[in-house]
Amino acid sequence: MRLKRLVIWLECLLSCVVFLGSAQAHGNKVGALVIDHPYAVEHPEKSGEYAVYFRELKNTGATPDLLQTAQTGVAKEAVFRTETHSVDHEITWVDVKSIQLTPKQAIVFRHDAEEGYQVQLRHLKRPLKVGDRFDMTLTFERAGKVNVVVWVQKPKPSDMKHQH
């Protein structure tokens, strides 16, 4: 009887480890594209506004690709933006139509980067909170449509060195 309980306990433990491992390492690899850890963060100064980022968005191949659109059911619109800096070092976000992924290069798409991109979610259909997850479809010129799961999270205090 004790051996049976031990086996059941070990199976449960192993299941938890497998689940947590897959939960921590969410992302996609589609052909030469690596889309690692899509996450949404609330705008630090505008409550209720969110942007989507990636731990890594990289083209590991030899052919360029183009990120053309992003769509999600949680917002009426998902818009690519990049930031520019004025002479006074003021940050201004500018909408961009698409994002070029050059061969063997990673795109800066992080909330704490000095420069880079984001997918701004406009006109949310429902409130988001830390811990939520939602689907997003990214459309690439060559790789086609890729579905990813975006996690809503709060940046770690050490990650908040660059705020918008």
Image (tube, helix red, strand yellow):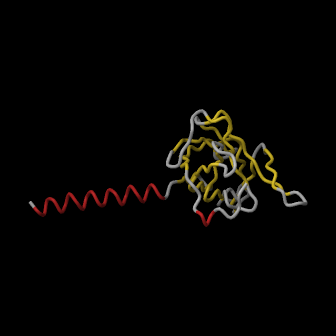
Q: Which of the 4 quarters of the picture holds residue 115?
A: bottom right
Which residue is at the far right?
87
Q: Is residue 94 above or below residue 86?
A: above
Horizontal placement of 112 versus 20: left or right? right
Residue 73 placement (x, y as % from top left): 58, 35
Residue depicted at x 68% and y 38%? 122
Residue 139 placement (x, y as % from top left): 65, 42
Horizontal placement of 155 versus 12: left or right? right
Residue depicted at x 66% and y 41%? 121
Which residue is at the far left?
1
Residue depicted at x 81% and y 55%? 91
Q: How many marks?
A: 0
Horizontal placement of 68 versus 12: left or right? right
Residue 164 placement (x, y as % from top left): 73, 54
Which quadrant is the N terminus positioned in?
bottom left
Of residues 85 and 109, the one drawn nearer to the viewer in this rendering? 85
Of residues 94 and 71, the one drawn nearer to the viewer in this rendering? 94
Residue 130 placement (x, y as % from top left): 53, 49
Of residues 59 and 8, the one drawn nearer to the viewer in this rendering? 8
Q: Which of the 4 quarters of the picture holds residue 71?
A: top right
Q: Is residue 114 above or below residue 51?
A: below
Of residues 154 and 8, the one drawn nearer to the viewer in this rendering? 154
Q: Which of the 4 quarters of the picture holds residue 77?
A: top right
